[in-house]
């Protein structure tokens, strides 16, 4: 899966992974994808909740050891968060 940007968010605790992803999403064009690698266990619930409220789409979630990688597609029209 080709992503426009990769964010290494390992070592960051809530809410910083969401804050950094939200900021990065603002630089993307609709339909572009970023991947975010996080070690925060809360991300498994935080990222889907954020995607639901922002209108962006998590298209793939992948476990990598103790980390989780999220592939997130920018919505065609996202609501401000």
Image (tube, rainbow, N blue to C red):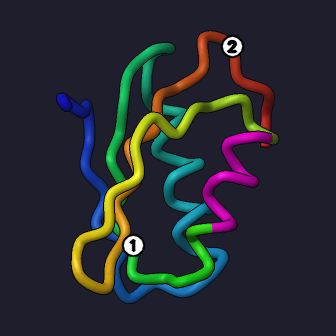
Relative to residue 77, is residue 46 depicted above or below?
below
Front tag of 1 and 2: 1
**Dot 1: element:** strand
**Dot 2: element:** loop
Q: Quadrant of residue 38?
A: bottom left
Q: Earlier in the sequence, mark 1 or mark 2?
A: 1
Residue 45, image x and y in percent?
67, 67
Whether pointer 1 and pointer 2 mark residues with C-beta atoms closer than 8 Å, the reply is no
50 in magenta = yes
**Number of dots carrying numbers:** 2
Secondary structure mainly formed by the magenta segment: helix
- Which is nearer the eye, 62 or 15? 62
Residue 26, image x and y in percent?
54, 34
- Which is nearer the eye, 22 or 37? 37
Crowding at dot 2, Cα within 10 Å, few <14 / some 14-19 / many 20+, comes out as: few
* Residue depicted at 52% across the width and 69% down the height: 17
* Residue depicted at 36% across the width and 30% down the height: 33
Relative to residue 16, is residue 50 depicted above or below?
above
Mark number for residue 38?
A: 1
* Residue depicted at 49% across the width and 82% down the height: 40
Magenta segment range?
45-52
46 in magenta = yes
Relative to residue 8, is residue 41 depicted above or below?
below
| Residue that mark 2 sits on | 77
Going by the picture, which residue comes out furthest to the left?
A: 2
Residue 32, image x and y in percent?
38, 21
* Residue depicted at 79% across the width and 27% down the height: 79
- Which is nearer the eye, 81 or 37? 37
């Amino acid at each position: 899966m080709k992503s426009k940007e990769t964010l290494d968010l390992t070592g960051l605790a809530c809410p910083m992974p969401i804050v950094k992803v939200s900021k990065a999403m603002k630089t993307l064009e609709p339909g572009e994808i970023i991947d975010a690698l996080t070690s925060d266990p809360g991300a498994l619930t935080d990222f889907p909740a954020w995607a639901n409220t922002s209108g962006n789409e998590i298209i793939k979630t992948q476990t990598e050891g103790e980390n989780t990688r999220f592939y997130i597609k920018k919505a065609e029209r996202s609501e401000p968060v």
